[in-house]
Image: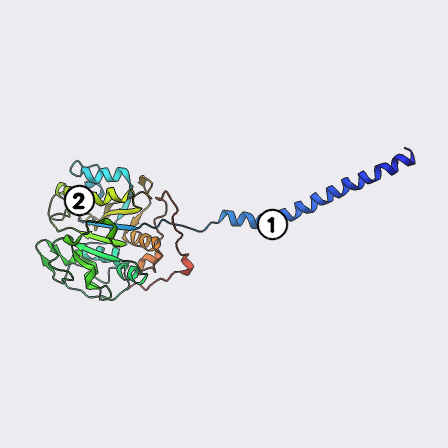
Amino acid sequence: MSKILRISLLPRLLFVCGLILGVGLLGSRWWAAAPTLARHVAAPATTLPRPDHVVIVIEENHGYDQIIGASAAPYINRLAGQGALFTDAHGITHPSQPNYLALFSGATQGVHDDSCPHTFSAPNLGRALLDAGLTFAGYSENLPAVGSTVCEANGYVRKHNPWVNFTNVPATTNLPFDHFPADYRTWPTVAVVVPTEDNDMHSGSIQRGDTWLQQHLDGYVQWAQTHNSLFILTWDEDDFTAPNQIPTLFVGPMVRAGRYAEAINHYHVLRTLEDLYGLPYAGNSANVPPIADVWTTAGIPTATASARTATATP
């Protein structure tokens, strides 16, 4: 090769070498950064939806197989078909009262029977909502008056009304069911509805309880579908068997319909409500995970567990 040809090729060779070197340096920088990028993408922040309203109805003393698939409960089974049905849900214990306390405060508060009255000051769902600037109310059918502390009255029983027992929950949140707002937009953030013993399947029939539920709550259930709100239906306990398996279902526009087989109990439901609104954990809810696999939308991020406050379990 002539000397002139070698000289003419030299700039081209230098250009190619520089290009190779540049690509190599760029590739090494990308490769070094890649693990960091991968970690960031693989570990997004955990999120749950944040409903505008949640209404919880608590029924009485029936097992899963007595309700799900039963011809006497057509409305409830229709709800189960359009929402998330938990096929392995359980009460905490027997009899009724400690289960209501567990759902509201994350602990049975040392109660092992249906005795009345009791007084507590432990952390609970109602107090946590109020402290967060949100709202809470309990609606008990046939409660004689706002804030009433009677043990029994015309089918109302205090053992099914846990919030009345807590001195840190205002008496103004303890409401008769006839205070149930006709304008659902004025509902509290979280409301609990407790029918009388005749209408919650305790003393009355399954069919009567199913009909009562449809007549009094279906308006809210239908409204919730277009207003970012959630309906929860559960039972306090089954009919006094050892497995204590109960129906529990979630219905709302943020819920993915289907059957869910994870084992849950009242503490999981409470923990889920706390996580929906970024509340501190009461009692044993701190020791269980939230229900996180039934949601169709991520919604607003909850606080991380490390930033949350777990309260002592009595």
**In this orientation, which residue lies closer to the viewer: 32 or 13?**
13
Q: Alpha-carbon neighbours of circle 2 within 10 Å: few (<14), some, or many (≥20)? A: some
- Residue lying farthest to the left in this orientation: 154
Q: Are marks 1 and 2 in contact (CB under 8 Å)?
A: no
Residue 271 is left or right of residue 175, and the answer is right
Q: Which residue is mark 2?
A: 213
Residue 204 image position (x, y, % from top left): 11, 46
Residue at image coords 29%, 54%: 270
Q: Is residue 238 visible?
A: yes
**In this orientation, which residue lies closer to the viewer: 108 or 255?**
255
Residue 212 image position (x, y, % from top left): 14, 44
SS at mark 2?
helix
Q: Earlier in the sequence, mark 1 or mark 2?
A: 1
Residue 246 image position (x, y, % from top left): 23, 46
Quadrant assignment, res 286: bottom left
Q: Which residue is mark 1?
A: 33
